[in-house]
Amino acid sequence: MTFFNSKYKFLFRPFKNIFLLISLVFLIWMLFFDSNSWMIHHELNQDLKKLEDEKNYYNQEIKKDLIEIKKLSSDEGLEKFAREEYHMKKSDEDIYIIEYEDSIRKQKGDD
């Protein structure tokens, strides 16, 4: 009784075709082992998508910054920024800064 008896003959019939074997080896080689394989293309496509997302993010940030620059280019915008961020005032003004409990940072000794 051999391994290639009639019971298992139908399993090995496709492998007797040389064109099918060559095509199968070629397909496996191209998918996994070649320098231009599907796996490498997949990784490169993922990297490309990440880079495009970063590009879109930075373009949005550039648009926001251009709007801020446009606001700061006027005297009113520059004065507003200086008053809000640096608490600057005119010589005849007094500034009162109101802080709420939830906006004050806890100091190290206040545990």
Image (cartoon, rainbow, N blue to C red):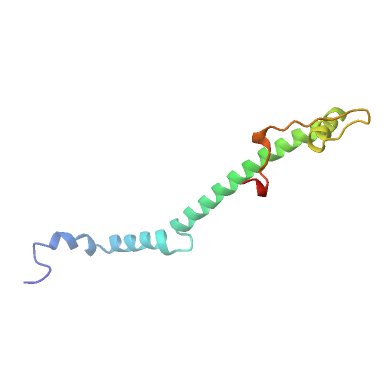
The residue that appears at 51% across and 50% down in the rendered structure is 46
Image coordinates of residue 108 in percent, x first then y, are 66, 49
Front one among 62 and 90: 90
Q: As drawn, which residue projects farthest toward the left?
A: 1
The residue that appears at 41% across and 61% down in the rendered structure is 32
Q: In the picture shown, does residue 7 fall above or below 82?
A: below
Front one among 103 and 25: 103
Q: In the picture shown, does residue 35 fall above or below 43?
A: below
The residue that appears at 24% across and 62% down in the rendered structure is 17
Front one among 78 and 93: 93
Q: Is residue 33 left or right of residue 4?
A: right
Q: In the picture shown, does residue 67 fall above or below 29?
A: above
Q: Quadrant of residue 99?
A: top right
Q: In the picture shown, does residue 49 fall above or below 1?
A: above
In the picture, the quarter occupied by the N terminus is bottom left
Number of marks in the rendered image: 0
Q: Is residue 52 left or right of residue 16?
A: right
Q: As drawn, which residue projects farthest toward the bottom?
A: 1
Image coordinates of residue 61 in percent, x first then y, are 68, 40
Front one among 105 and 58: 105
Q: Is residue 21 left or right of residue 57?
A: left
Image coordinates of residue 57 in percent, x first then y, are 63, 42
Image coordinates of residue 24 in percent, x first then y, are 32, 60
Q: As drawn, which residue projects farthest toward the right?
A: 91
The residue that appears at 12% across and 70% down in the rendered structure is 3
Q: Is residue 81 left or right of residue 33?
A: right
